Image (cartoon, rainbow, N blue to C red):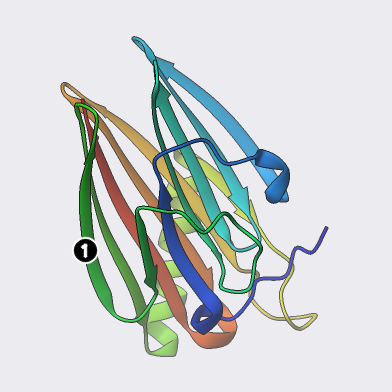
């Protein structure tokens, strides 16, 4: 299993409205959450994350993946991580909104943000450190937090890329 992150320019965001085989991803951490009649499976991967939400026959699968990764082609949304982007769709009676952002930061700001994310991950959420590109370099991290709302779920993901001084963020809202 490769645990070194790809470059940000090689990442894509994809959304599916059907299940995607979990064998397509090398998950480094997995957590399952159930709320009422719905289930959210969170997977951290070397390329970022896979969020799989389902209730009855309604499915949403959000992921950050390498652009050359073999995945089903029939998806709802596909975006490269260039600046900030927004997307939304409706699947059955479920509304889905996403905000994507890749931000390059000055070195001192990047270190501060990276430390804040590590501290937040130590308190809550799902946190994983990846192998750094160089032996004494800062280790990239992946953090996913999930907040339950009266009408759905809010999921925030943060993925750091120290070699590029970049933080890739997604904020997803699933309203049901």
- Secondary structure of the residue carrying tag 1 is strand
Q: Is residue 115 visible?
A: no
Q: Position of residue 12 (x, y in %)?
A: 47, 69
**Residue 137 relative to residue 60: left or right:** right
Front residue of 12/125: it is: 12
Relative height, residue 48 to residue 146 (above, below): below
The N terminus sits in image quarter: bottom right
Relative height, residue 124 to residue 15 (above, below): above
- Residue at 21%, 47% in the rendered image: 89
Looking at the image, which residue sits at the far front? Answer: 74
The quadrant in which residue 166 appears is: bottom left
- Residue at 51%, 79% in the rendered image: 8
**Residue 90 relative to residue 81: left or right:** left
Badge 1: few (under 14), some or many (20 or more) residues near its Cα, within 10 Å?
Answer: few
The C terminus sits in image quarter: top left
Q: Is residue 5 visible?
A: yes
- Residue at 34%, 9% in the rendered image: 36
Front residue of 75/146: it is: 75
Q: Position of residue 120 (x, y in %)?
A: 42, 48
Relative height, residue 93 to residue 3 (above, below): above
Q: Position of residue 133 (x, y in %)?
A: 73, 80
Looking at the image, which residue sits at the far bottom? Answer: 106
Relative height, residue 82 to residue 100 (above, below): below
- The total of numbered circles placed on residues is 1
Front residue of 113/1: it is: 1
- Residue at 49%, 51% in the rendered image: 143
Looking at the image, which residue sits at the far top? Answer: 36
- Quickly name the residue at label 1: 86
Q: Position of residue 85 (x, y in %)?
A: 24, 70
Front residue of 34/109: it is: 34
**Residue 95 relative to residue 153: left or right:** left
């Amino acid at each position: 299993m490769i645990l070194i992150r790809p470059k940000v320019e090689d990442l894509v965001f994809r959304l599916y409205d059907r299940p995607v085989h979990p064998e397509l991803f090398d998950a480094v951490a997995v957590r399952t959450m159930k709320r009422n009649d719905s289930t959210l499976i969170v997977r951290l991967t070397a390329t970022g994350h896979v969020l799989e939400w389902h209730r009855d026959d309604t499915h949403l699968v959000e992921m950050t993946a390498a652009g050359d990764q073999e995945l089903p082609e029939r998806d709802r949304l596909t975006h490269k991580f260039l600046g900030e982007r927004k997307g939304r769709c409706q699947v059955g009676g479920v509304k889905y909104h996403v905000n994507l952002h890749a931000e390059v930061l000055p070195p001192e700001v990047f270190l501060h943000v990276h430390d804040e994310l590590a501290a937040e991950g130590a308190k809550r959420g799902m946190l994983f450190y990846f192998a750094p590109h160089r032996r004494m370099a800062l280790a990239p991290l992946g953090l996913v937090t999930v907040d339950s709302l009266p009408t759905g779920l809010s999921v925030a993901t943060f993925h750091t890329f120290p070699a590029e001084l970049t933080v890739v963020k997604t904020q997803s809202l699933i309203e049901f």
